[in-house]
Image (cartoon, helix red, strand yellow):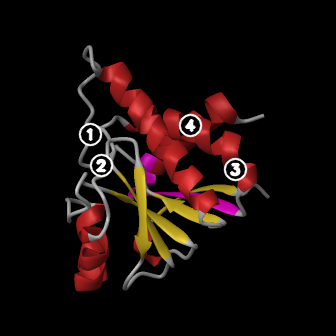
Amino acid sequence: MSNLILTSGNILTLRADALVCPAHKHLVCGRGLSAQIFERGGAALVAACEQQSECAVGDARITRAYGLPVKYLLHTVTPQWSSGDQWGAQAVAQLRQCYERVLDLALEKKISSVLFPALGAGTNRFPHVIAAHQALEVLHRRAGEFDRLTVCLHTPAALAEWRQVDQRFFSR
């Protein structure tokens, strides 16, 4: 059995050591999944985030995961999709860097299982096929460093897109 899992559902109900939170550079409550995480984490999470330094696009920070079924939150600032214009290549590289940096931080903190949403594909509007390709290339290459990496997609349709990318480009 692979230690890289693709699934769909409510990521906030799954168990792992850490959950990746799409973040604002000041680690304040954002939209989408970020808002749900901050709602559950409450004042303790807000206070923990206030102690962190500003986080650049593509970088990551760690806090405890107050009120969630995981121990840690790995906050990462994802780029905004710019519809493939002249800044599109930079945004794609930054998205890939989010995955790399989160995994580096997880290893540094001895975290062995991580839950990922479809970084960038929510409120930052990356097409799932592009987000999936960037994520899966990094996650497949680094999966052996962890007990379990799980990508939880919000809908069955998104899961189908990710599985299609996985089968087309990464199945052996």
Q: Position of residue 82 (x, y in %)?
A: 23, 27
The residue at which mark 4 appears reads as: 164
Label 1 packing within 10 angstroms: few (<14), some (14-19), many (20+): some
Q: Nearer the viewer, mark 2 or mark 3?
A: 3
Question: Is residue 10 visible to us here?
Answer: no
Q: Position of residue 40 (x, y in %)?
A: 29, 81
Circle 3 — which element?
helix
Circle 4 — which element?
helix
Amino acid at the residue labelled 2? Gly
State the residue at coordinates (55%, 76%). Answer: 15
Q: Position of residue 64 (x, y in %)?
A: 43, 77
Circle 2 — which element?
loop
Q: Position of residue 156 (x, y in %)?
A: 44, 55
Mark seen at residue 125: 1
The residue at which mark 3 appears reads as: 143
Q: Which residues are magenta?
A: 148-158
Label 4 packing within 10 angstroms: few (<14), some (14-19), many (20+): some
Q: Are marks 4 and 1 in contact (CB under 8 Å)?
A: no
Q: Is residue 79 above or below residue 49?
A: above
Q: CA distance from mark 4 to mark 1?
A: 19 Å
Q: Quadrant of residue 16?
A: bottom right
Mark seen at residue 122: 2
State the residue at coordinates (59%, 39%). Answer: 138
Q: Are marks 2 and 3 in contact (CB under 8 Å)?
A: no
Q: Earlier in the sequence, mark 4 or mark 1?
A: 1
- Name the residue nearer the viewer: 24 or 127: 24
Q: Nearer the viewer, mark 3 or mark 4?
A: 3
